[in-house]
Amino acid sequence: MTTTRPAVLTEGLRKRYGPNWALDGFDLAVPAGTVYGLLGPNGAGKTTAVRILATLLSFDAGRAEVAGLDVTRQAARVRGRIGLTGQYAAIDEILSGRQNLTLFGRLHHLAPRAARRRADELLEQFGLADAAGRSAGEYSGGMRRRLDLAASLIRTPEVLFLDEPTTGLDPRSRNRLWDAVRDLVRDGTTVLLTTQYLEEADQLADRISVVDSGRVVAEGTPNELKSKIGGDRVEVVLHDVAELDVAAGIVERVCATTPDRDPETRRLSAPVTDRVAALAEVMRALVDAGISVEDIGLRRPTLDEAFLHLTGGSRSTATDGSTGPSTRASTSGNEAERR
């Protein structure tokens, strides 16, 4: 039987900063040709893991592979197969958009004509062709992020690391960047995405690892992670809080479990298995009892709720190694820029 090697693999990865373990037994297996999300609070270890995988940081124990290559023993070959976009755009604000991309092309050993051609292709792909001749310092935040991502793709990487790529972007710019990421994956690139935006992970990631205190505490598809805190729920909002007790009794009888109550919002909520039948029965019973309802419906757990449940509501401030300058590694391995 043939097996497909993960595009990114770590086993028992450990990294210490002073007395703190930024990574403490970090295990990860990213299938090729997917978007894989690393989700976790500040200080969880996400950026440290990315910097190790991009060969920018050593580690203390364990092992790590990217594209089937050992990140320590074969670092130069790894850098030839990856791209990295950090949390802040790493572009020269004096140069124009076209000049920035042409410069990166030359750093990747493209001939002058080939570098200019590739720059124009990327400017068109990322919706920057009309601004190609303008100084990057005049670009909006969203335009800079798109230019930064384009610079990581001068040579299409086998694996692309995106470390919180949409930080500070407005919704429209974020959506355009998401579309660009989806296009890359359709063309065969594997994307490892770190983010604190739960909607971003939900929209983009095929699978997600939830990271807390330097290790993976849960892994699965977005729906699988949501299911860890229960399935569908019936939610009822009453007109009159005085009817809360009677309505709660009805919901408990139908759903066979004591509902959660929120008197302030006049809301009842209970998990259900047969979602449609339970909703219909609750509605019927409330009407028969003469209880006035402001709203009723079915709701699935959100990734936000799953995240808080899996991390215990954590917002860790432990050292992650990400408080210093962000980094970008070029795919040729000949340029690493610290910011």
Image: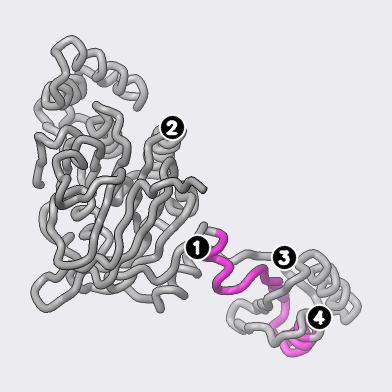
Q: Which of the two labelled residues, at mark 2 and mark 1, occupies the earlier sequence position?
A: 2
The residue most toward the top is 113
Disc number lying in front (3 or 2) = 2
The x, y position of residue 165, in whole percent, is: 30, 46
Q: Which of the two labelled residues, at mark 1 and mark 4, occupies the earlier sequence position?
A: 4
Q: What residue span does the magenta drawing correspond to?
A: 223-252
Q: Secondary structure at mark 2?
A: helix
Q: Mark 2 Cα within 10 Å, few/some/many (few <14, many 20+)?
A: few
Q: Residue at x 25, y 56 (%)?
A: 64
The x, y position of residue 332, in whole percent, is: 16, 32
Distance from Cα at disc 3 to Cα at disc 1: 19 Å
Amino acid carrying mark 1 in the image: Leu
Disc number lying in front (2 or 4) = 2
Q: Which of the two labelled residues, at mark 4 and mark 3, occupies the earlier sequence position?
A: 4
Distance from Cα at disc 1 to Cα at disc 4: 27 Å
Q: Is residue 244 magenta?
A: yes
Q: Secondary structure at mark 4?
A: helix
The residue at which mark 4 appears reads as 254
The residue at which mark 2 appears reads as 183
* 286 vs 225: above or below: below
Distance from Cα at disc 4 to Cα at disc 3: 15 Å
Amino acid carrying mark 4 in the image: Val
Q: Mark 3 Cα within 10 Å, few/some/many (few <14, many 20+)?
A: some
Amino acid carrying mark 2 in the image: Asp
